[in-house]
Amino acid sequence: MTDAAILSASGLTKEFKGFVAVNKVDLAVERGTIHALIGPNGAGKTTCFNLLTKFLQPTAGKITYKGQDITGLTPADIARQGLVRSFQISAVFPNLTVLENVRIALQRRRGDSYDFWRSESVLHEYDDEARAHIQDVGLTEFSNERAAELSYGRKRALEIATTLALNPEMLLLDEPMAGMAQEDVERISALIKRISQNRTILMVEHNLSVVADLSDRITVLARGEVLAEGDYATVSKDPKVIEAYIGAGHA
């Protein structure tokens, strides 16, 4: 592990009743990069991601964030330290407007549950900051629309806006392009690239063209173990990676 790593794992292992889903994975995500975690179906990507974001506890191994051991912490603990998992922690309420959704995220960041019982006029104190996050994700013209009325891709953008409202230093994105039309893929890819300018991103993603376009570094998993690591040009030509994808039914 290097000093440049903001998030690292050493010997990360997870067993489920004798089945080893993740086996002694070492991972280092360097500060200020976009790092992708990829692999064929059944590779252990989701389990590894859930371990890193503390939705699962490892059977063995150590996870370090900004030099501190976070192996035993909860998702809420690490979110308070600036490590936030998008689409899991984000709160999006379909019957509230885009502005109201982001404002609720800002209230939650303050940690004051009584904010939910305060007058409407007091809550408007958050509006300027909420609008800034909405502008960041390209949803300004939809500020007063209910979240339920947004297209799928714009709902994803709103979820990212609510996550950004928590002021994370590092974002962990779980398949941000899943189920999207190409137009939405392009929009969210551009958004991820834009918001990565002053933060670190780790993402699990199946869309390899997105991975190629966005990622500085890629870790490839297969059968719960690290198969290869490097930039896209390196891992895409690795015979072991090609064999793993073809063997799993991927071209």
Image (tube, grey):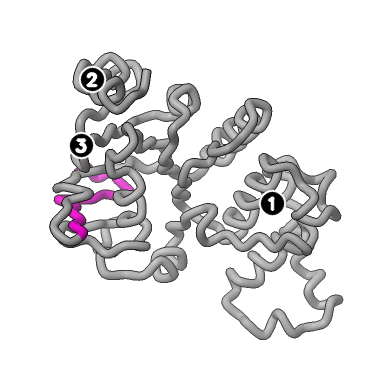
For mark 1, give the secondary structure.
Answer: helix
Q: Amino acid at mark 3?
A: Val
Density class for disc 3 (Cα within 10 Å; few <14, some 14-19, many ≥20) is many
Q: Quadrant of residue 110?
A: bottom right
Give the Cα separation between the discs numbered 1 and 3: 36 Å
Q: Does the stretch in magenta take in 222?
A: no
- Residue under label 3, please give it: 226
For mark 3, give the secondary structure.
Answer: strand
Q: Amino acid at mark 2?
A: Glu
- Residue under label 1, please give it: 133
Q: Which residues are magenta?
A: 1-16
Residue at x-position 68% and y-position 68%: 104
Density class for disc 1 (Cα within 10 Å; few <14, some 14-19, many ≥20) is many
Q: Position of residue 226 (x, y in %)?
A: 20, 36
Q: How many marks?
A: 3
- Foreground disc of the pair 1, 2: 2
- Residue under label 2, please give it: 243
Give the Cα separation between the discs numbered 1 and 2: 43 Å
Left or right for 56, reference 62: right
Q: Is residue 105 above or below residue 216?
A: below
Q: Position of residue 188 (x, y in %)?
A: 61, 35
Q: Amino acid at mark 1?
A: His
